[in-house]
Amino acid sequence: MNPVFSVLARDGAARTGSLATAHGVVETPAFMPVGTYGTVKAMTPEELEDLGAQIILSNTFHLMLRPGPDIIAAHGGLHGFMHWAHPLLTDSGGFQVFSLRSLRRIGEEGVHFRSPIDGREVRLTPEDSIDVQRALRSDIAMALDDCTAYPAGESEARASMERSMRWAVRSHAHYYRGEQQAPGGLFGIVQGGMHTSLRLASLEALLRLDWPGLAIGGLAVGESVEQRLGVLESLTPHMPPERPRYLMGVGRPEDIVAAVALGVDLFDCVIPTRHARNGHLFTSGGVINIRNSAFAADLAPIDSSCDCYTCRNFSRAYLRHLDRCNEILGSRLNTIHNLHYYIGLMRALRQAIAAGRLAPWARDFLAARRGADAVA
């Protein structure tokens, strides 16, 4: 079934909403933990449920290479394969292809690249990406796009964007082909680099087709915060208000808050889980590095204002000890805390918007983080 989005409350450009899918309703704004290989690293599905995770993102590119779509389809799709009963979004593989610059060649048909696993040549066309995502049976699939490099001049960005728009037409036609009902809904992706005119042209091209949601791609690729906000400020007012807006790959807390204020509804990023494995932990006052020797005898929790399982039961000294001993439990406890922080951040944003207090809430949030060591 196509996801159905409803706006529930507004505060300026920000809004809360509900996104109904075949596997449940997502309250927005929402953050999607990244489960690249069909697992959020170090977490069981039940632990994610207990944290309040509503939707997970998994990676079409990596699941296509291993274990392959046929094995996942034999489990009834990715939900059955990974034992996750709630909504799933799969990306198209476009960003992973973008990151394999030395191993791939792009043409009108699609992309040919050398597998980073075994070196064999692999083809990924818009139709290939859709076939894999339909086999995964995700609630939200993504059209294959050509992620524009940064920096890119106007002519380079235009060529990349226009290719993405042609691929979007092919992705849409293949996903909604008539012989069998699509398992979910397909989102289109706005591209165009840092060029406002190209972003608006991309949006105009996408709106010639009916998409249940739209994503903003090609950000978090090296541009400045000011450039990213400039793109969002020029683009989001023109995006259909009745459709969810998904900002791909942006995940620092302060960047999420800024994007929510501009009307974005969905986010994903590896930051909370990757940072957890590297000892970087999010707190109400900023990010701390648990590997710092200052925490060697610190009996306090990560964050005294946090009620996650980790903070209720373990000290900073213990977590530093686990990290220094390379104990798996350390990564697990850190991940529980960071995801609890992110899911709590989204809950607080929804509450602030519903109360009409997003602006003062955001000011207080950012003030509390000033002066903290930035690692993201």
Image (tube, grey):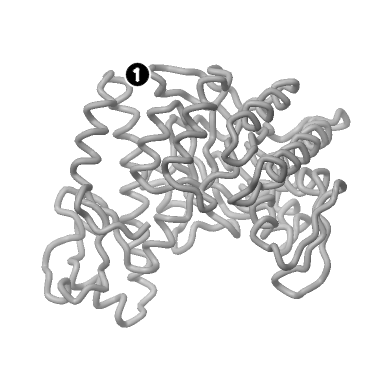
Q: Percent x, y for residue 39?
A: 54, 58
Q: Identify which residue is drawn at 75% across, 34% down.
A: 165
In the displayed structure, would residue 235 be above or below residue 38? Answer: above
Q: Which residue type does callout 1 highlight?
A: Asp
Residue 371 horizontal side relative to residue 16, left or right: left
In the displayed structure, would residue 374 be above or below residue 57? Answer: below
Q: Identify which residue is drawn at 60% across, 60% down.
A: 37
Q: Percent x, y for residue 345?
A: 32, 40
In the displayed structure, would residue 109 be above or below residue 97? Answer: above
Q: Nearer the viewer, residue 269 or 69?
A: 269
The quarter of the displayed image where residue 262 is located: top left
Q: Identify which residue is drawn at 67% across, 40% down.
A: 154
Disc 1 element: strand
Q: Percent x, y for residue 41?
A: 48, 62
Instruction: Point out the image quarter for the C terminus.
Output: bottom left
Q: Nearer the viewer, residue 144 or 307?
A: 144
Question: Mark 1 = which residue?
Answer: 11
Q: Percent x, y for residue 212?
A: 64, 25
Instruction: Point out the image quarter for the N terminus.
Output: top right
In the displayed structure, would residue 219 be above or below residue 202? Answer: below
Q: Identify which residue is drawn at 22% across, 73% down.
A: 292
